[in-house]
Amino acid sequence: MITYALRRLAYSIPVILIASFLLFWAVRRAFDPLSKLRLNQDQTAIARETERLGLDKPIPEQYLLWFKGFVTGDWGTSTRTGRDVLDMIAGAAGPTVQLIFWGVLLGAVIAIAVGTYSAVKQYSAADYVFTGVSYIGIALPAFWFGLLLIQIFGVWPVQIWNLADPPLYFVGLHSVGRSDLGDYLRHLALPVVTMTITLVASWSRYGRASMLDSLTSDYVRTARAKGVPKRQVVINHALRNSLAPFVTVVFLDAGILLGGLVVTEQIFSIPGMGKLLLDSLLAGDAQLLLPWMMLVAITIVVFNLLADLSYAYLDPRVKLS
């Protein structure tokens, strides 16, 4: 297992290097790091920043200069805010990681339960209901569903019942001056549900398909022939072996979520990675966009590696050679 992990890690390093160069080239072509200075027509400042950033050098030399700074933690200064890019991304990563953790945890638990039940009760009324709801969830626009939740749990209770505070908050992840668990959960509920509905809809389909394959396998038929109780067959045999492809999908989607919550974070005013990306794109902040994209690319590669390792760990039939 260690040999396999080291081999997969060695394969990931060239992928990260190639991705970093392509991202650097694309951002340099699409955005001008000195756009703000050019508006002021300060030729002295432009010349100074051009030399400091190495913009007068060929693209390969610029890339090496930037990559050295990225590895050593020198991510530059945002042209939009004047703050250190590393501090801004670190501050934005916290709220996003919280959403991903709770959303993935809740989504995985519900998806496993729904997928397993649908597979065991194949072609039953409940199976048809879960299948239909999952298709709706996959097609459901996140922005529309999020706004609907805000209206139902945030606006209507205040308007109809004249409540001082809504049952669930829909701005940020905590109230100013408060840090108690109840307040935190009231802020967390709506964005997590908005994100989870799509995850459950998609993952439950994977869980159902994987479970159906396990239920028709030889080892399950053998266990049933030996008189093993149905519940034990489903949980100890079929479910355990069906988790390998399911966990792989969960890891792959979780890696993408770091930069894929733009709509959810924008709707609920959460200062996370997605909102940071949108604000930086609108401002043309090249100094922040490049480290942001690089961090997301590394996260996706790392979670792909974790998906491979989890599959190899959960399914002993996988050959590690």
Image: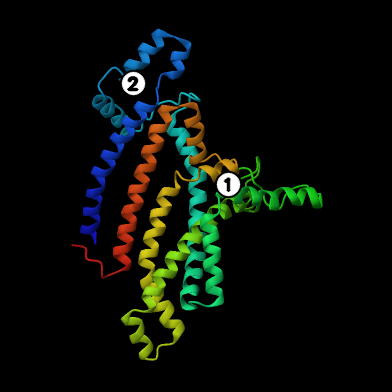
Residue at position x 28%, y 30% from top?
Answer: 68
Of residues 216 and 160, the one nearer the viewer is: 216
Q: Is residue 183 visible?
A: no
* Dot 1 amino acid type: Phe
The secondary element bearing badge 1 is classed as helix
Question: What quarter of the picture does the C terminus occupy?
Answer: bottom left
- Disc 2 or 1, which lies upstream in sequence? 2
Q: Is 213 rendered above or below residue 48?
A: below
Which percent across, then down, holds residue 214?
37, 75
Verify CB contact (< 8 Å) between mark 2 and mark 1: no
Of residues 129 and 72, the one nearer the viewer is: 129
Residue at position x 72%, y 49% from top?
Answer: 166
| Circle 1 Cα neighbour tier, 10 Å, few/some/many (<14 / 14–19 / ≥20) | some
Indicate left or right for 315 with 10 as reference. Answer: right
Indicate left or right for 49 with 162 as reference. Answer: left
Location of mark 2 (residue): 53
Which residue is outermost to the left?
321
The image quarter containing residue 47 is top left
Numbered label attached to residue 143:
1
The image quarter containing residue 224 is bottom left
Which percent across, then down, holds residue 135?
52, 61
Numbered label attached to residue 215:
none
The secondary element bearing badge 2 is classed as helix
| Circle 2 Cα neighbour tier, 10 Å, few/some/many (<14 / 14–19 / ≥20) | some
Give the distance between the C-alpha atoms of the residues marked 2 and 1, in whole angstroms. 39 Å
Which percent across, then down, holds residue 191?
58, 50
